Amino acid sequence: MKQTPWWVLAIVVFTLFPLVVTNPFWTTIAIFTLIYMGCATSWNMFSGYSGYVSLGTAIFYGCGAYTMALISIHSHMPGGAEQFLLVPVGGLVSMVIAVPLGAVALRVRRHTFVVITIAFFFVFQLAAINANFTGGPAGLSLQLIGWQGNSYNTPFYYVALAILVFAVVLSALVRRSRFGLQLLAIRDDEDRALGLGVKVKAVKLTGYTLSAFTVGMMGALYAMFLGQIYPQFVFDPVFDVTVALMAFLGGFGTLLGPLVGGLILESSQQWLTATYSNGSLYLILFGALFLVVVLFMPQGIVVKVKDMWMKRSLKASDDSSIPTPATVTGGAK
């Protein structure tokens, strides 16, 4: 409850941002930042709480994007606000796809699970590149949206913000529920959780499937925003690493961590890419930040700052409890 005013303040700031900052350059960066913050939050809802690190999240991002594109194209849907109705459809399709993938990948433990998710990712990437219905390497183009001016980005921004808020609320509800406690028990000691009666397989599969929903919606929004998608961009291995790095940077397994990590990494990446001609410069930044986190903040920024604040508060309270000479002698005579 003590943190509620800060969350309200954050929502107010994010809501007012496109009204105050109308430059398309900055609102475009903000949209991509919100998309990655939502994907990192959803990824953390499963991987952070259960300890099963997935490096195949781009599967659901790409499936959501292609769901949006294929339905829009084959139904001859005009470009405009109607396409937003397909955003949750992209999330639902990603959830459906996550069920068989999770049923197979979650039969093994953590380290092998990482390898299997990577293998699944490359299967989907190669299928998207070589299949005819995906457009192959040429990708797919959606109907052009006729919105004009600096307000073009505004609807996309608010839809991305709504999905992000949904992801945060869902993650908070999961963490505070019995289901979330079961995920955390699996992270701490899976064998012990199984011995205590936790239905480990069902809990893991449910968490894995839930995490795919928001990622799929963000993928669908990405396809609509750009108006054209390519398999090598929506099924991108850098996406998998980036989303995981955001969660680790901010605080793996925390609610606020992925938001902080996504805000820092994606906004800086977009700014560096747009400002400098070297499109891979942000990878150097990511590598440097990763080293800093591993060496100095292995638990992430949020946990580190929280620990420092608690130590400072304890020190201040200890100092205030030490009696001064005046207090001991009853004050000056």
Image (cartoon, rainbow, N blue to C red):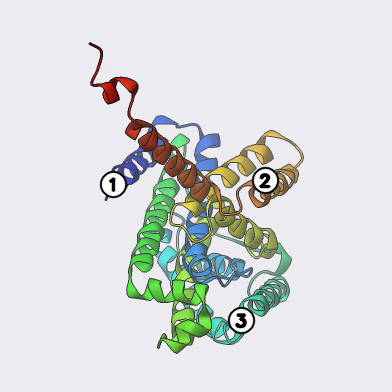
Give how far apart the Cα atoms at labels 1 and 2 are: 30 Å
Q: Which residue is mark 3?
A: 109
Question: Residue 143, percent across and down?
Answer: 52, 57
Q: Earlier in the sequence, mark 2 or mark 3?
A: 3
Q: Residue furthest top?
A: 333
Horizontal arrangement in the rendering, residue 243 relative to residue 283 (left or right): left
Can residue 143 be seen here? The reply is no
Q: Secondary structure at mark 1?
A: loop
Identify which residue, 276 or 71, lies in the foreground: 276
Q: Earlier in the sequence, mark 1 or mark 3?
A: 1
Q: Earlier in the sequence, mark 1 or mark 2?
A: 1
Residue, x 52% and y 58% (percent of image)?
A: 40
* Residue type (three-letter) at the residue carrying disc 1: Lys
Proximity of marks 1 and 3: CB atoms separated by less than 8 Å? no
* Residue type (three-letter) at the residue carrying disc 3: Arg
Identify which residue, 330 or 145, lies in the foreground: 330
